[in-house]
Image (cartoon, grey):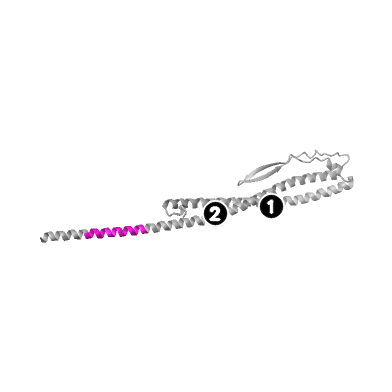
Amino acid sequence: MDNSSVPTKGNLIKAKKSYKLSKLGYELMDKKRNILIREMMALIEAAKDIQSRIDETFSKAYKALQAANISLGVCNDIARAVPIDDTLKIQYRSVMGVEIPTVKSVQEAVENVHYGFDSTNSMLDIAYLNFLEVKRLSMLMAEMETSVYRLAVSVSKAQKRANALKNIILPRNIKRIFDITNALEEKDREEFSRSKVIKANKIKEEQKEHLKQMALQQKEKAV
């Protein structure tokens, strides 16, 4: 038998304390889950907007690039002049203990293009600017998708813990308190009944002794 289930007042106090802590833990875990869900839903809505903007900007960029290819010829050599962007930096912010990434890039000025203007036209400039915007939006999209994934994992964990507290730990503590309380009350009733029986027997003994004393006194008077 588990010592914590032994019906004593000490164990009853511990059981009530454990129940209060479990209830507080469930409330905090439920609040955390709700906050994470709200944060996740907000990011999902923002991601939908960014995805539509990416599709629209991609369409504009490819149309401009197609026009530039028609007017300038295939722009492979010009594209090679644009350096690879390795300026991305990832920072993190905490939302209820969940590390959410923030992607940043050292943006270049628009005028710092990497091709000459004498052999290009405005259609290539439009394509270049639109692809820069696509890159920026893609960074935001990657940031939000990663954030949503991490939040979803944390929501799932918080939900499991909240369910465990609600459906297992709290009922177990309630039953433990109920059983110990009933056992102590039954023990008190037995003790009370035993005390009454002892008191009644003591009164009977005192009455018998009193009757004996009276009988002796009467005999002495008769003599």
- Identify which residue is drawn at 84% across, 44% down: 124
> Left or right: 41 with respect to 11?
right
Residue 75: say if magenta.
no
Residue 201: say if magenta.
yes
The x and y percentages for residue 146 are 69, 48
> Left or right: 175 with respect to 97?
left
- Between the residue at mark 1 and the residue at mark 2, the CA separation in whole angstroms equals 31 Å
**Quadrant of residue 205 within the rendered picture:** bottom left
- State the extent of the magenta-drawn residues as a range: 190-208
Query: Label 1 sits on what residue type?
Result: Glu
- Identify which residue is drawn at 47% across, 50% down: 17
- Provide the residue designation for mark 2: 165
Q: Which mark is residue 45?
A: 1
Task: State which tag comes first along the sequence, 1 or 2.
Answer: 1
Query: Label 2 sits on what residue type?
Result: Leu
Looking at the rendered structure, the secondary structure element under dot 1 is helix
